[in-house]
Image (cartoon, rainbow, N blue to C red):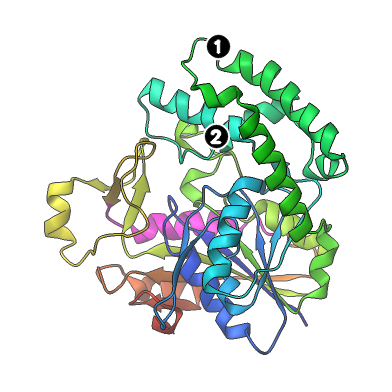
Amino acid sequence: MQNIKLIIGANYGDEGKGLATDFFGAKAAGRFNVINVLTNGGPQRGHTVELSDGRRHVFKHFGAASFRGAASYFAEQFIVNPMEFMREYDDLRAVHETPEAFVNPRCRFSTPWDILTNQMFSEKNGLHNSCGFGIWETVLRYRKGFGISFGTFAAMNTEDRIAYLRGLRDSYFAERIRGLNAADYFFSDDLLIRFEQDCESMLLLCPLRDDEYLRHYQTVLFENAQGLLLDGNSLEGQEFSTPSTTGSGRVTEAAERIFRGTDIEICYVTRSYLTRHGDGPMESEITAHKMQTVFPGIKPDATNTENRFQGNLRYGMMDVNLLAERIRKDFERCPSSSGNRYRSSVMVTHLNEYAGVDTESLARQFGTLYLSDGRTSGDIHIF
């Protein structure tokens, strides 16, 4: 029987999904073949994994179980970025064996002009509601009909790809940035050629595969990005949300198509306190001054450093009742008439920094509870 896990952030992101994915990958490593599915968003994710041997990596375009030998699979809802793929591929290869990856041919893909346009608008409007990777710009472009699937793009020859990209740049993007002060390299053919070369390199390293390919693996780890409070389907805080489904909905729909009669664990990950990037409403937020009193044990976050697109990481108190309510609400979306069997669990991280969250209440409500009081998968214990 296959071992299926779905890792979901329970709040605003930055909860420890990389740690959780590495934990489940470590449990399966050496016993089962493992594939790590990137389910939503794109490489704006930053899922950190630290190993006991000192290696550390922030996974963006690869699954966070890569250190455990897991292959990565970019699902249909994931937005691929060939330039980011090649950058991270080289970074990973320097500290680990060559990572294996596959891409769904129906994936959308970001271009360097999506990224640059995103960054220009963010700076013009003075907002901190973006990671600067062009995800919203990519989604908007596809919604307006200016996008093709990665599989369709892959089927073109080099000359046709370059012609397609040049036409996209000189028509759609030229109009999109009208009135903005774009740097000279925005329309540089050097940038265009480099992007096409990265696309070609990615296609050589990353074969196209449909979802049914996941049946070849004993362990399948679906690794969601962002968190439930940033779901693009929510009517609250739309301008500060992410343009994707951050909960179980899309993944369980895929699971129903792919698997039959399988036990599927949905693990909701939360820190022992709340964090949020950038602007937008935040539940139970506390000021930076008060944070030093309430959370004296919080250590500097090496991943979530201040940047010009997101600003500083913000902090808040955890309300366990509200947390449990949104987890139950998301879990209730799981299909009830299929042969697959779903169960929920909760992982609480950063307990070494703040242990004031009511973990006993979570254990009573959700049964399986994973507790982490450190930075590596070896620091996770089952309550």
For the residue pair 208 and 224, the one nearer the viewer reads as: 208
Is residue 150 found left or right of 69 in the rendered image? Answer: right
Callout 2 secondary element: helix
For the residue pair 161 and 211, the one nearer the viewer reads as: 161
For label 2, the crowd category at 10 Å Cα-Cα, with few meaning under 14, some 14 to 19 and many 20 or more, is: some
* Residue 178, disc: 1
Magenta span includes 317: yes
Does label 1 or label 2 sit earlier along the sequence? Answer: 2
Please tell me which residue is depicted at 23% across the width and 64% down the height of the picture: 299
**Is residue 103 visible to the viewer in this orientation of the structure?**
yes
User: Which residue in the structure is indicated by mark 2?
Assistant: 115
State how far apart marks 1 and 2 are (Cα): 16 Å
Specify start and end residues of the magenta stretch as a single range.
316-334
Magenta span includes 299: no
**Is residue 206 visible to the viewer in this orientation of the structure?**
no
Please tell me which residue is depicted at 35% across the width and 35% down the height of the picture: 279
